[in-house]
Image (tube, grey):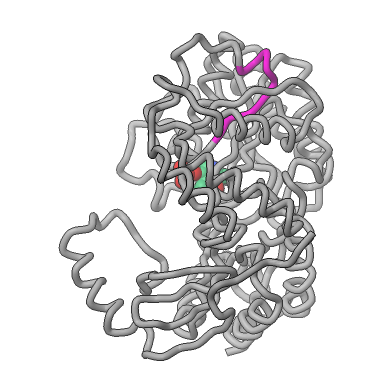
Amino acid sequence: MSEPIYHLPQERRLVTELPGPRSRELAARRDAVVAAGVSSSSPFYATAADGGVLIDADGNSMIDLGAGIAVTSVGASAPKVVANVQDAVANFTHTSFATTPYESYIEVCEKLAELTPGDFEKKSVLVSSGAEAVENAVKIARHHTGRAAVAVAENAFHGRTNLTMALTSKAMPYKAGFGPFAPEIYHFPSSYPYREPAPISGEEAARRAIDHLETTVGAERIACLLQEPIQGEGGFIVPAPGYLESLQAWCRAHGIVFILDEIQCGFCRSGRWFASEYDGVEPDLITTAKALGGGLPLAAVTGRAEIVDSAQAGGLGGTYGGNPVSCAASLGAIETMEDWDLPARARAIEAVIRAKVEPLVGEGGVGDLRGRGAMMAVEFVEPGTVRPDAARAGRIARTLLAQGVVVLTCGIHGNCIRFLPPLTIPGSLLDEALDLFVGAVAA
Ligand SMILES: *Cc1c(COP(=O)(O)O)cnc(C)c1O
């Protein structure tokens, strides 16, 4: 086990007003040519990133609490990722695994089989984005079962393609104006402990979901049940203990493929290799992306060989799926996660966040602090109520951005601030960012 290596100074250092002149100039050029539907939560234009810092076009060094939306868990320029990518790209950029295959694709699938939960024979298909992985998981489940219906949790986020928009709960900005959506999607009430009117156990929350599905759809029509073990975009919602296990048992009893989407919470983010491990569940299919690719586009569906293999040859894949440069980056990222023991670093990040932020909870509109590992969120509410306060979360995010801390919001109501740093962030930077957060909450 070794410590992270950095090539950029790990410090917050502001040398211009924020955003600086160069970023403002790029923003003006952007407005002329980049689609308005593509948004950016921070006003800085990046030129470099490493460990816990992002450098902008004006030379400001900012603290990164977003990790490119949980992608750069190993940092944005980790030595093994950079070296592997440089080697791969100099050899060949692409052949298409569908025409002339290569070894790195197989190596990534071997790693996925070894690392994902479940001690059974597993196979994988590699694709380029998280949404594409979720689409393929649903394709496989439908093919395997011969059934059409897809059961999906409320407060879910699964992507922006047509099928995954249908699977996603949040209308604004993900669905509004983009319908009609794919049919045969059924949302069930999930487990959201903070927002239960009265405390209920995980088993009871699962029973509520199952009753809903049995009443409104019928178990025998359902191909798969899909859930994030920690809901990401929905607000870093950790379900009550026993909830996922009860859903898994019901799926097994009814021949329903149990799919967990670990695109955001997987690959060390939660403090374990996969968040499912906390719940003692072994999904039939698991979707991964984000941190899997070490910053390059790569996603996967991994699962029980007999389920994955039900799809006919040629039915899965794509021109770019499992691109050799992405596979090389992924192998470098996974090796880095092992060498630097990133699950342990994620747990240490959780301890620091809890120590700094827990004292605020329950007062002044800080409703809840929750999450696991380096995936923690604070939910803001109107003081003395549980009514969501998205305006406050937005103001705090803007205050932090103006001080050089790149932070993201989330939540089905947009009222959460999420802490999602690279797992390689030095402790001193994390402390500094959290002190600024505490100051912004007090202001
Ligand atoms: C980000 C995300 C996706 C979609 O991934 P893309 O690569 O943006 O298509 C799907 N599921 C979850 C849980 C995610 O966090």
Left or right? Give the position of 123 relative to 62. Answer: right
> Considering depth in this image, is 93 or 207 the residue closer to the camera?
93
Please say if 157 is above or below 320.
Answer: below
Task: Give the residue furthest to the left.
Answer: 32
Instruction: Pick the quarter of the image with the N terminus.
Output: bottom right
Residue 126, given in percent of the width and then of the height, sits at 52, 31
Instruction: Pick the quarter of the image with the C terminus.
Output: bottom right
Please say if 386 is above or below 315.
Answer: below
Residue 88, given in percent of the width and then of the height, sits at 47, 43
The span picked out in magenta is 300-308
- Seen at 59% across and 79% down, the residue is 10
- Seen at 35% across and 46% down, the residue is 176
Residue 79, given in percent of the width and then of the height, sits at 57, 60
Total residue callouts: 0
Please say if 417 is above or below 212.
Answer: below
Left or right? Give the position of 370 relative to 79. Answer: right
> Considering depth in this image, is 403 or 387 the residue closer to the camera?
403
